Image (tube, rainbow, N blue to C red):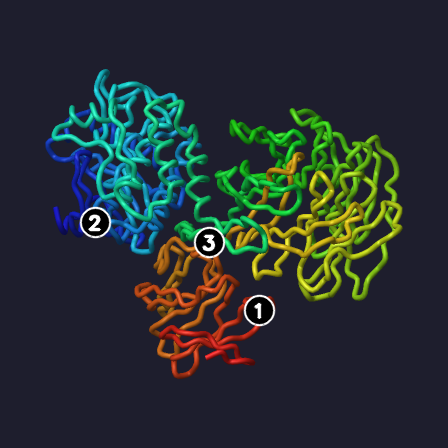
Amino acid sequence: MIGKTISHYKIIEKIGEGGMGVVLKAEDTKLKRTVALKFPPPELTRNEETKQRFIQEARAASVLEHNNICNIHEINETEDGYTFIVMAYYEGETLKERIERGLLKVEEAIDIATQIAQGLAKAHAMGIVHRDIKPANVFLTSDGVVKIVDFGLAKLAGQVRITKTGTTVGTAAYMSPEQTRGEEVDRRTDIWSLSVVLYEMITGRLPFRGDYEQAVVYSILNEEPEPMTGLRTGVPVELGSIVNKAMAKNPDERYQHVEEMLGDLRSPGEASVSRLGKKNSAKKISRPLLGIVAIGLLLALAIVSYLLIHQGKEEFRITRTVPLTIEPGLEQDPAWSPEGTRIAYASDESGNMDIYVRQVAAGQRLNLTKDHSGYDGKPAWSPDGEWIAFVSERDGGGIYLIPALGGIPKRLLSLSFARSLSYAGSIPSVRWSPDGTDLVYATSGIVYTIPVTGGRPAPVPLPPTALFIGYSEPAWSPDGKRITYTDLVAAGVATSQIWSVQRDGADPFPITEGKKFDHSPVWSPDGGQLFFISDRGGSHDVWWVPVDTRGQPTGHVRPLTTGAGVGAIALSGDGTKLAYAKVVERSNICSIPIVPDRMFTLEDARVLTSENHYIELLSFSPDGNWIAFDSNRSGNQDIWIMRKDGSGLRQMTTNAAHDWVGSWAPDGKRIAFHSLRRGNRDLFVMPVAGGCSNAIDKPSC
């Protein structure tokens, strides 16, 4: 079959073969790209069950668009009736091949398991259970990105099982107990299989073994695996606990959702603040690489972070971070319900920016404003949890109230969007007073309050500061006596400060110094702390400061997150949970040949990079053979270089602050770039071969 053309795919070579089919490398002659074709083995081509499994695989996986799931391009059939699917082709190796080469580092194994969990979270959210998670079905690309492959055994929600009654499918060593018994399975069987894969990556051996399949099944049903800590030194005890919980024989005793396991996998590696002011000695696990093949996709994730308060007001640490939303598109403006079981947020999941309410535990969500085609956003809960206030473009624009369980929105205040934009073109936010009688908002550079029963807005007299631009993001103190707000203090410079004032305008004073971009203040329920977003660490993160009842700082400003890229925050009513939204822009570099008198389209483009996050700037070396660019593929905006054909990818900077590429020196041996590593945009020069980076004004090497 090598060299043969099927449809418009020219076969190059065979790259794999297994029980569910043969995989061939091929060239898509229409789109000029390399793809993988999957066929059932010849001896099974007349088997209708096998054919239906392949069709099911394509249909299941084709609806899944996620960085950690293999992309399915199409399902097709040859002229002589052979069914095949067309998949994305990746350079790299299977996890099975990687394990056979030797033990993985603990951090590497956790990174791979985390990425598998991310892909499964997407599949489970779409009602799809893989049912055959094993190293042979996990592919590691050369860029370090994990791809789940072979959804041929997946079960779509509500679909009649194709497998015969009483039979089991999958590989016995990775099967859950309920799967070995031939019972109906759900997402928890994937959680079991993932724990087996993680166990094998860490120890180099399977937790349940036997000389034949029945012996393996007996072990799965009746025996307990040897603890990982007893098979390898340096394995965190917490990791053993994660695997044990995921590998509970009773499905009800396992993680019920893969997001829960994902949160625990991430928590050992988070740079958590354990006792503020003291260094955390825990090792940091490298963040999983994120990205997609599509160019220029904007994605925001609403994250639920569990914030524990110890010894009253003295210390904070984030112990668990769980993704709340995994739907494609933009999710922003999280707001906790007073009882802490629901979160309201704005999302364009439906193709329109609407207000959603989501149950945190169950994951059920309700679109409150689906009847409106314009913008609805900035939700705020009433203190009793019965109503949500929000800003909308409907009927010319205004502030609206809607029942939290759904209903007809009623306009509280007419607010033309043409005049309502506060500083920097942002949309005004709304906050409910603690007693539920008033709302506070900022528009056109003025802070107002308005009764929730309606009436005329009352401006809050605020003192203008030097180079005054406007006010934004007002928030009530817990006792309702004061209002904090953001004041943009310098035109053309991204600096602002947070102020506190009585609602009648008396006793104003700044809480932060105004040297950085401090904004989005949120009070703790007891009024003893103020949380806000700032770029003072080089990235937009959550910071906090202890305050008195007036909002006057009583201690030093301290970070709560590091390198999180936070866009909005909300604190739960009991002060134990923090929700934040982050925005990630994803893109890739493409190459298009330039030929005189010929018009080119995107189909002619050759994608040089894959699995990248946001790429902002790029620069060719003087000889035209290398490209330098900045990307946040590692979780931070760093500088990378690669050859013009996309090979030889290498990371050049690893500083916690963002770096942006500038230009190459004429000799091609150095690259100039600018960075926020000193808290300000400064210029640096680094050698292309690696080594230290020299600040132009103060060389360090």
Q: Considering the numbered disc 1 on the image, is that residue within a helix, a strand or a loop?
A: loop
Mark 3 or 1, nearer chain start: 3
| Residue 687, quarter of the rendered image | bottom left
What residue is shown with label 2? 25
Disc number at residue 560?
A: none
Q: Considering the numbered disc 2 on the image, is that residue within a helix, a strand or a loop?
A: strand
Relative height, residue 416 to residue 123 (above, below): below
Task: Give the foreground label among 2 and 3.
Answer: 3
Q: Is residue 73 visible?
A: no
Residue type at mark 3?
Ser
Q: Position of residue 242 (x, y in %)?
A: 39, 36
Residue positioned 61% across, 59% down in the render: 535
Query: Looking at the rendering, in which quadrant would you find the C terminus?
Result: bottom left
Q: Is residue 338 left or right of residue 25?
A: right
Q: Position of residue 296 (x, y in %)?
A: 48, 53
Disc number at residue 678?
A: 1
